[in-house]
Amino acid sequence: MSRSPLRSTHAALVATLLCLATSAVPAQSPRSPAQLLLAPAVLRAFDEEISGTIMREHVGYLASLHRVPASPGYHAAVEWLVAKAQSYGLSDVHVETFPGDGRTWFGTMRGNRGWRVEGGELTELSPHPRRIGSFDDLKMLVADNSESADVTAELVDVGPGTAAGDYEGKPVRGKLVLCDGPPAAAHRLAVEERGAAGLISYNSNQRTGWWRDDADLVRWGHLDGRGRHNTFALMISLREARELRRRLAAGDTIRLHAVVRAGNDDSIPYETVIATIPGTDPSRGEIVYSCHFDHQKPAANDNASGCAAILEIGRVIRKLVDQKTIAPPMRTIRFVFPSEMIGTIAYLTKYPDIAARIKAAIHLDMVGGNPAVTKSVLHVTRSPWSAASITDDVAETFARYVIAGAYEGAASGDFSKAVREPNGPSDALWADVTEYESGSDHWIYQEGSFAVPTIYLRDWPDVYIHTNQDIADHVSPTKIKRSAFIAAASGYFLANLTAPSSPSEAALPYLVLAGATRRMGEALERASGHMWGKPGIAREGIVVVSEARRREERRVRTLERFDYAPAGSPGAQTLAEVESDLQRLFPVGQPPAPEAPDTRVPRRNPDVKGPLDPSVDWVRDRAGDAAAALAINRIPRGDDVAYEVVNCIDGKRTVSEIRDAVSGEFFPVDVKVIGEYLELLAKIGAISFAG
């Protein structure tokens, strides 16, 4: 009887760990893995210098500004940021500008229009005269990209307002429409197609377990950012909306007066602030710290927190280097403060030489929420399988160091190993390591046409995201300090990573191997679900494990990206040993061939830069309704699956092999679904087929 893969794996694991225990760890006092990557003195210097109080103050200032992209409020924030970065001694501080005309393409994405807003007010004239809301009190009252208006009209309740059936028997021409659906979608049906005067919206654009528990929240809304037929939308609370709906249902005729002073302005550019700490050997490439600088007032955790954190990281590294407390970084460290998504892809497509030099990025989006208030958990998010990199292990190593120290302090009162703000909370850190999730600018960096390994730190869930209560008071100085510490240590380590010159530096591949065993264990656990009730291991279970091992093999090889293993060096020998260990630990064979393989080999058009999932502007612009009709849109996480399908195009894999790659990462996907999607991309010129 042949041995099962699980038994072979267990035996290999025991043998390898015994080997590592006797030969891989240098003879010295025990150190934590984080102290193998950075000396204890360096970690202590970061802990002592990073200030949660300073970051909290920066969050407070940014939260006072209405930072809608390509707007005067955003520009005011840019001016403040430039002054701060210069005062901290950062180099090459400047502002990159990109057209905010709603027509310019940045890779596969099209920018929005600039927008100015000066005021707005909503009042009830009858039957109960009162002021409902004012822009002076609440900047979220006026939805983004609204145009000026002065309208007195009756209010009509259309429910969601996003389907034709919502308007049956409800004449809305010349009236104000009370609606719950996304304002841009409701505007098309109510205003552009049926002649309504404008929208009164209570749409909630982020759902969590606490969704709509607080009926007094007012949520961020926006009309079509490139629209040429916008009127306006005014945002109100759920409590206000429920009362208006109750009164309308009871037969009240409610007349409102809506005033908006705003307008789209194609002359206002997108702005991205850039700063650097020059490396001692710029030829070794760059490490990027990224955030997104925009969002409506207050937008404290999302994402003044991430911006404040990377600004503080710049201050701290610059100061510690100048004081000779830490060595200067070998690679240049670049700080990028863009508007979300558009600012990032605009910068990378404008400067392909800079994009090509980036060895890794560290992206921070929502990193300071006080979990006792916001319910947030800090996630150290792994790369998608297509972009698996040793950066995941670096971030996880420092994250576990911070999590363990915080827990020990909270559990025992011994804070000697805890990163926390002086006199700050004594809490443990609510944090974990999670698989890839999209939703922020790391999505751009890790996309196949840029292929930048990216560490992503994020809070989720957050009760107050995109609401008037995402305020600075809900940002914890200790939480944001811990997030900044993880990011600072990770980026500084990567900025100096090269061929090992000490036993501790030589330990990195073994930390990667240790991480691989954890991740492979997770894959084996998932694969077991395919075995239940079947004789032997089903093909899909083998796909999960075999693709997971390929992911780990690719991950180990990414050390070469950081000049760790030049030919003939000790690093190259160590890498070969670790690869051998990985194969011995997980002797997984190829899954059986599919019954009807799709042997076509897709190749990407190198001139098309950026994501290509069916909802992306470039795809919809060229494919029209065919993009929305794709079957891939109707499967769970279809956007992430589509993203990885394209990322797996390497000119070697067949369609069936790409199918296995994404099925191993997510769940079994029909090869016909993948083939249909790729055929559409070929039809619009994004890819071509060979074979």
Image (tube, rainbow, N blue to C red):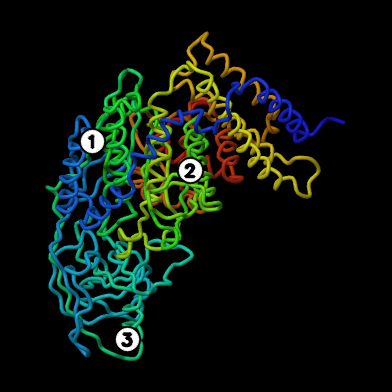
Q: Distance between the residues labelled 2 and 3?
A: 62 Å
Q: Label 1 belongs to which residue?
A: 274
Q: What element carries label 3?
A: helix
Residue 504, x across and y down, in percent: 52, 23
At horizontal 52% and vertical 16% (from top left) the residue drawn is 571
Q: Which of marks 2 and 3 is nearer the N terminus?
A: 3
Q: Is mark 1 on a helix, strand or loop?
A: strand
The furthest residue to the top: 568
Residue closer to the observer: 124 or 300: 300
Q: Is any part of residue 631 visible from this angle?
A: no
Q: Is residue 560 above or below residue 173?
A: above
Q: Is residue 247 above or below residue 492?
A: below
Q: Which of marks 3 and 1 is nearer the N terminus?
A: 3
Residue closer to the observer: 671 or 213: 213
| Residue 248: numbered disc | 3
Residue 448, x across and y down, in percent: 42, 33
Amino acid at pointer 1: Ile
Foreground disc of the pair 3, 1:
1
Amino acid at pointer 2: Ser
* Snapshot quadrant of residue 285: top left
Q: Distance between the residues labelled 3 and 1?
A: 52 Å
Relative to residue 413, is residue 152 drawn left or right?
left
At horizontal 56% and vertical 19% (from top left) the residue drawn is 575
